[in-house]
Amino acid sequence: MLLKLIWGYGLRQMWSIKIREMTESDRDWAAAVVTRQFGSPEVVSRGVRHDTHRLEGLVAEVRDERLGLLHYHMEGGRCEVVALVALSVRRGLGRKMLQELEFVMRARGCSRMWLVTTNDNHAAQRFYEALGWSLVAVHRGAAAAARRLKPEIPERAPDGTPIEDELEYERRLDGEETSDDVQGSIDLRS
Ligand SMILES: CC(C)(COP(=O)(O)OP(=O)(O)OC[C@H]1O[C@@H](n2cnc3c(N)ncnc32)[C@H](O)[C@@H]1OP(=O)(O)O)[C@@H](O)C(=O)NCCC(=O)NCCS
């Protein structure tokens, strides 16, 4: 029993995730990570092109090694998660980064956190759903418009799925169940 406790404690120490603000010295690393994941340091969502190099962000570290990042954009009491990448998946990095962002956003008076992912990204969809985010809209055909702003967006995912739609997820911080924020081709709110 004691051995089990010591072993468990040791494992937790080895995989202790620290989340901190992104600093200028992280910028080149972050741009490289975003480029590897999304084809360029720019991310397009809902018809807006974001230069992630200029966005605020969080970094996830384990034993001083950078293993994840999150870029966000806050405006008018709303916070969009523009990019989220865990370099080691299913180990709690994504969850911890979003939890920290929520903590920061509550302190800053944010009422709504939101993001888009694409129809092919099943892992991300499972992830946001597991964390209790709500799918509030499906923007049909939005990927084609995004591709006009960012030609690096491929037509198909590696598994062959056509990349066509933007799926909008939200997490309300103000307790409201509905909002006027969602302007989608298919609004899934009841
Ligand atoms: C999406 C992403 C950020 C998730 O981060 P992560 O650190 O792997 O996720 P976590 O370990 O915090 O997972 C939390 C929970 O989400 C769910 N989840 C995460 N990934 C999942 C998957 N691939 N399939 C099913 N459920 C998943 C699980 O319930 C998980 O808890 P569990 O592992 O205890 O079962 C990560 O997969 C990633 O970086 N993907 C590539 C980039 C990307 O697609 N970013 C999102 C763009 S919108």
Image (cartoon, rainbow, N blue to C red):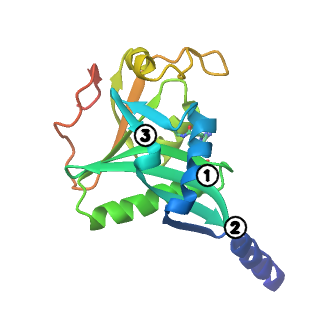
Query: Compared with residue 157, is residue 98 higher up or lower down, i.e. above or below?
Result: below
| Marking on residue 29 | 1
Query: Compared with residue 31, is residue 57 higher up or lower down, i.e. above or below?
Result: below
Which is closer to the viewer, label 2 or label 1?
1
Query: Compared with residue 61, is residue 153 higher up or lower down, i.e. above or below?
Result: above
Gap between marks 2 and 1 measured at Cα: 21 Å
Instruction: Check disc 2 and report the residue beneath it.
Output: 15
Q: Is residue 96 visible?
A: no
Rendering quadrant holding ligand 1: top right
Amino acid tagged 3: Asp
Amino acid tagged 2: Trp
Quick one: label 2, few (<14), some, or many (20+) residues within 10 Å? some
User: Badges 2 and 1: C-beta atoms under 8 Å apart?
Assistant: no
Say which element carries label 1: helix
29 or 103: nearer the viewer: 29
Image side of residue 17 versus residue 80, left or right: right
